[in-house]
Image (cartoon, rainbow, N blue to C red):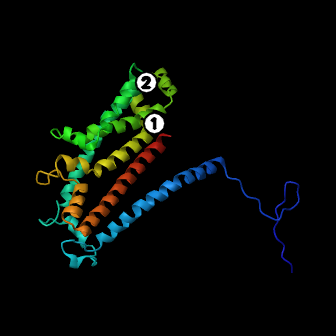
Amino acid sequence: MTAVSEQVPSAGGAPTGRRQRRSLSPEAQDRRFGYGLVAPVVIVLAAITAYPLFYNVWNSFHHDYKLDPASVGTFAGLSNYQKIFQSSPLLPPPFVPTLVRTLGFTVVAVAIELVIGLALALVMDKPFRGRGLVRVAIFVPWAVPTVVSAELWGAILAADAWRNTPFIAIVLLAGLQVIPRDIYEASRVDGASALQTFWRLTIPLLKPALMVALIFRTLQTFLIFDVVYIMTGGGPADSTSVLSYLDWRAFLVETDYGYGGAVSVALVIMALAIAAIYVRVFRTDYEVTQ
């Protein structure tokens, strides 16, 4: 018995002896092209971050206390993670109170930045004389180096919100610029008030930009180090220490790389959880409004 191969007819009706390829849709082609554009950046970032990440994970499960060379490299199990919930004079500031302080600082700072940044974005979205100058001037706090802003605002402790509010304002302004103006005209024709238009049109359509701004600023504030280090050094009596400052203390002051690795891993997990929550909440809300 002879085997018969399946053949696909050609345009003229004759079999070609090979299967024709399915052409990709324009959306699939655009998606593939986009993946090709971002692939080099993803590869470079992965190469840069992979070693520190795995090094910290390895440290977190081993003893690596530089003042005790005999213990370096020995397996520690979960003891470094247990230290997170312990309080000792030999350890940096306790993790749990520092976590609570960091979360409180993050909520207050991001809330202030969001309210003021949204107000600035709404103002800059309106046409008025000198709008271009105002949009340029809004970058000034963001362009000031962290060291300078921390020293200038050291007496009143509001440096982070002052410096980073322009970032949120610019991101939200970009989101406002892509909202079609005709929907505002339609809302006015329907008799909607300015407040109703803001809550029912502007905020829902601004949610993608809000998600980007909040993810960036929440993670940056949650992992803040430089402002605290410059302004207070974690003092007085560790009352202003945050998680990144605690991690720095574990590595470079206490030289306990095992405990520092455990804190670093905990920070990464919490940062990913925060980003995932934002994406989940905003994606659900955005899909509901469609």
Disc 1 element: helix
**Residue 84 shows in the view:** yes
Residue at 39% over, 65% down:
51
Looking at the image, residue 66 lies above or below residue 290: below
- Residue under label 2, please give it: 192
Viewed as shown, does residue 156 lie left or right of 175?
left
Label ID, residue 225:
none
Q: In this view, does 46 lie above or below 176?
A: below
Picture coordinates of residue 30, whole percent (x, y): 61, 48
Residue reaching furthest bottom?
A: 1
Decide: is 63 above or below 185. Answer: below
Work out which quarter of the rendered image holds the N terminus and state it.
bottom right
Q: What residue type is labelled 2?
A: Ala
Classed neighbour count for the residue bearing mark 1: other residues with Cα under 10 Å, few (<14), some (14–19), many (≥20): many
Q: In which quarter of the image is residue 61?
A: bottom left
Viewer-nearest residue: 110 or 233: 233
Q: First in sequence, mark 2 or 1: give its number.
A: 2
User: Is any part of residue 195 visible from this angle?
Assistant: no
Residue type beneath disc 1: Leu
For residue 205, the mark is: 1
Which residue is pictured at 32% across the width and 48% down the height? 220
